[in-house]
């Protein structure tokens, strides 16, 4: 449930001496009632409209783990990598993977087609897609209020199974970048998360595009 006046909710629960919990993140505040009902608040209406993606992702990945067991993350690779020997005089172009982490999660079966399609249905859902994946397995700290007064912090430890799955999404994406780099050889300039930069020739464009499409990934040119 989305709430639009968090201060009013907190004041009411304090005045009524109710039990509740609060957790703040970069994007939203989670308000949990004594019976476990969760409500979310965010200043951005765009973000709030897509909060349901969090529950869809969590449901999908838990189902995947139940059916397939734990995920062993792909080899750890850097998020950014540069070829120090690249000739900077070259005309350089970039090709970016569309919705990279989201697409990798779908292609590996971690999220369903329904969740995937809902996630890409609106451009403003980009931050939500990333957050729904990046928060998988992360530790959480709730401020617990008893009878309307702050009582203590409730710490939920990191879930390594979910964190491994998210790491696999990240490192698999960088693994695709590394394959592009190896294919381009000396014409490779760098990769930055999900975008590979290289010497701009028709041949190089063809190589990268064919490789990405062989994985089922969509792309766009970054001039």
Image (tube, rainbow, N blue to C red):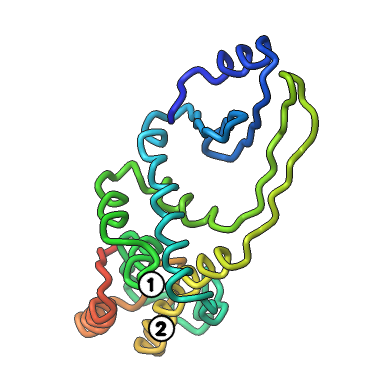
Q: Is residue 184 above or below residue 105?
A: below
Where, by quadrant of the figure, is residue 2 drawn?
A: top left
Report the front residue among 61 and 178. 61
In what element is the residue under mark 1?
Answer: strand
96 sits to left or right of 209: right
Please state the horizontal and vertical placement of residue 208, each as a whole percent of the image: 28, 79
Q: Is residue 11 left or right of residue 117?
A: right
Q: Secondary structure at mark 2?
A: helix
x and y percent of residue 123 in the render? 29, 45
User: How many numbered marks have been drawn onto this rendered protein structure?
Assistant: 2
On-image quarter of the N terminus: top left
- In the rendered image, the quadrant that contains the C terminus is bottom left
Query: How crowded is the residue under tag 2: few (<14 C-alpha within 10 Å), some, or many (20+)?
Result: many
> Depth check: 59 or 94 in front?
59
Q: CA distance from mark 2 to mark 1?
A: 8 Å
Judge left or right: residue 105 versus residue 213.
Answer: right
Question: Which residue sits furthest front?
Answer: 35
> Residue at the location (50% across, 80% down)?
83
The first of marks 2 and 1 along the sequence is 2
| Classed neighbour count for the residue bearing mark 1: other residues with Cα under 10 Å, few (<14), some (14–19), many (≥20) | many
Q: Name the residue carrying label 2.
A: 181
Where residue 82 appears, as percent x and y from the top left, is 51, 76
Circles 2 and 1 in contact, beta carbons < 8 Å: yes
Pointer 1 residue: 196
Residue 89 drawn at (x, y percent): 39, 75
Residue farthest along the right direction in this orientation: 151
Look at the picture and state if 137 lies above or below 154: below
Residue 78 falls left or right of residue 68: right
């Amino acid at each position: 449930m989305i709430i639009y006046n968090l201060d009013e909710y907190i004041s009411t629960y304090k005045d009524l001496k109710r039990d509740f919990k609060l957790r703040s993140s970069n994007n939203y505040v989670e308000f949990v009632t004594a019976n476990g009902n969760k409500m979310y608040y965010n200043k951005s209406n765009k973000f709030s409209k897509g909060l349901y993606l969090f529950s869809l992702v969590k449901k999908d990945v838990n189902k995947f783990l139940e059916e397939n067991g734990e995920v062993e993350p792909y080899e750890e690779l850097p998020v950014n990598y540069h070829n120090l020997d690249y000739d900077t005089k070259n005309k350089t172009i970039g090709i970016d993977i569309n919705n990279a982490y989201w697409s990798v999660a779908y292609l590996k079966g971690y999220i369903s087609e329904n969740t995937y399609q809902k996630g890409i249905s609106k451009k403003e859902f980009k931050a939500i897609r990333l957050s729904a994946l990046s928060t998988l397995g992360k530790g959480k700290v709730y401020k617990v209020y008893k009878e309307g007064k702050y009582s203590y912090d409730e710490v939920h430890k990191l879930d390594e199974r979910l964190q491994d799955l998210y790491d696999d999404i990240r490192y698999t994406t960088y693994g695709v970048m590394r394959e592009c780099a190896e294919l381009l050889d000396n014409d490779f300039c760098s990769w930055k998360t999900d975008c590979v930069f290289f010497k701009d020739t028709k041949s190089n464009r063809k190589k990268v595009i064919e490789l990405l499409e062989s994985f089922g990934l969509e792309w766009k040119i970054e001039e």
